[in-house]
Amino acid sequence: MSRCLFAFLVLIHHGPAIAGDLPPRPNIIWIMCDDLGYGDLGCFGQKTIATPRLDQLAKEGMRFTDFYAGCTVCRPSRLSLWTGKHMGHTPISSNANYHFKPGDVTVAELLKDAGYRTGGVGKWAMGWVETSGFPLKNGFDFWMGYLDQGQAHNYYPTHLWRNGQKYPLPGNVLSDHPRARGRVTSRKVTWSHPVMTEEAFAFIRESGDQPFLLHVHWTIPHANNEGGRVHGDGMEVPDYGIYKEKDWANTSKGQAAMVSWMDRDVGRLVDLLRELKLERRTLVIFTSDNGPHSEGGHRHEVFDANGPLRGFKRDLYEGGIRVPTIAWWPGVVESGTTCAEPLAFWDFLPTACELAGAEIPAGLDGISFVNALRGMKQRSHDYLYWKYGRKEAVRAGNWKLVRTDAAKPAELYDLKGDPGEKSNVAGEHKAVVQTLQDYLGQATK
């Protein structure tokens, strides 16, 4: 039986509305924050930071409790998202430099071929203007934001990129500090986040009746790592908002303000869809690219950002890869539902293609989760696989195998009773360890 049990029971109770035909060629919006932890939202257990709009989104939609990023760091996670492949079949499994090659096929290309208008804002990370990895060479009609993930550390850059042109951010002046690496601003005037957000809203308004795919890849709440090294505070916000008077370190105020600002803008996006009467024609998925950071002077423990999970960014324990995920689509996704089926970023491409009526390429690792969205029985993965440098992990059902190094013994956890991965039971379940180790071998073939 599908793990989306609650959603399925709600469907039975409320009748056949969800089981009917889906709206044809819906709009698809993928909102992805940067370094947002599993426990950073109220609807996933956060007690201190206010996220009322996302909490409401979860009440009106579906929470995915076992949804995973493509990797535990930025670039490979995005690579997995756009290509439908896990780390066993991608060219990189770390933040090593990579730009899309002509032979790479992205979800944007497939939906564009199916008649969709395709756009994105925020962090790209897959290639500069002059390379084959430039967004407009990989299926996007429009992209506005950061092309390089290192430059995206700075919330006050001198410019962003709008398609192939520099888009100046007035008043910002880069620091000449030797440790700044061109990523710290000494004079901060124009904050990048609202500039990119308004471009996303404009894209929605300008799409008219044409179905669209929109990636909103905000850099919030990633730290400015270089800013943390230069002046001890990498949490760059124009003000601390409702946290201004808190008796906290400024890094904590900045972190909380980023999350609440992001929450507000998710609400503004939903309000815009309702204003344009697009809500019943639009699937919105909200998530994060990996687990929470401990960078820029901030530590993830301050707000319990990984919640009940072990580990954080750069770990392959659950806290590094399991991410808070919400799906919202009035009339299709039943409100107040939960899905516990283990799913991952590489499932997005086939899901988007099925909804758009686009051809799903062969050789993917992903499976469509349209049935999960509809509260119906969802096909399960045999296993999910991650790799980061020398680390590997695989999940099959509720069993999770972690190898922190090829030279060290494998660790085994039963996530059903131990989601925090506190008790290594490898010695008690040798047959399970062998099965999951076999999956490790299969994953890279």
Image (spheres, grey):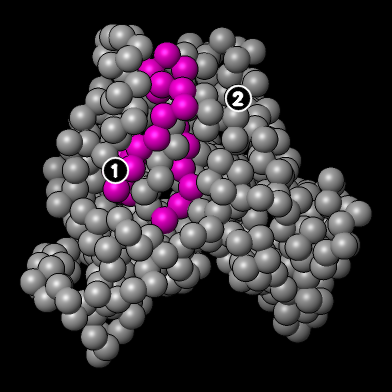
* Region rendered in magenta: 322-349
Question: Which residue is situated farthest in the bottom direction here?
Answer: 407
- Decide if residue 244 is on the left or right side of residue 337: right
What kind of residue is marked 1?
Answer: Glu
Within-10-Å neighbours for mark 1: few <14, some 14–19, many 20+: many
Res. 198 image quadrant: top right
Q: Nearer the viewer, residue 162 or 196?
A: 196
Locate residue 19, reporting x and y percent: 26, 14
Q: Which residue ends up furthest to the right in the rendered image?
A: 245
The one of 436 and 15 positioned closer to us in this rendering = 15
How crowded pointer 2 is (Cα within 10 Å; few <14, some 14-19, many 20+) is rated as some
Up-down: is 306 above or below 208? below
Quadrant of the rendering where the C terminus is positioned: bottom left
Residue 2 is tagged as none
Residue at point 28% right, 16% down? Answer: 12
Q: Quadrant of residue 174?
A: bottom right
Image quarter for residue 358? Answer: top left
The residue at 86%/67% (across/down) is 186
> Which sits earlier in the primary sequence, circle 2 or circle 1?
2
User: Closest to the observer: 218 or 2?
Assistant: 2
Q: Is residue 441 above or below residue 336?
A: below
Q: Nearer the viewer, mark 2 or mark 1?
A: 1
Residue 345 in view of the camera: no
Residue that numbered label 2 is attached to:
270
As for residue 328 lying within the magenta part, the answer is yes
Who's the residue at 30% across and 35% down the image? 4
Q: Measuring from the top left, give residue 34's x and y in whole percent.
A: 56, 54
Where is residue 313 drawn, in percent x and y? 50, 67
Q: Amino acid at mark 2?
A: Val
Quadrant of image for the N terminus:
top left
According to the picture, the residue beneath numbered tag 1 turns out to be 341
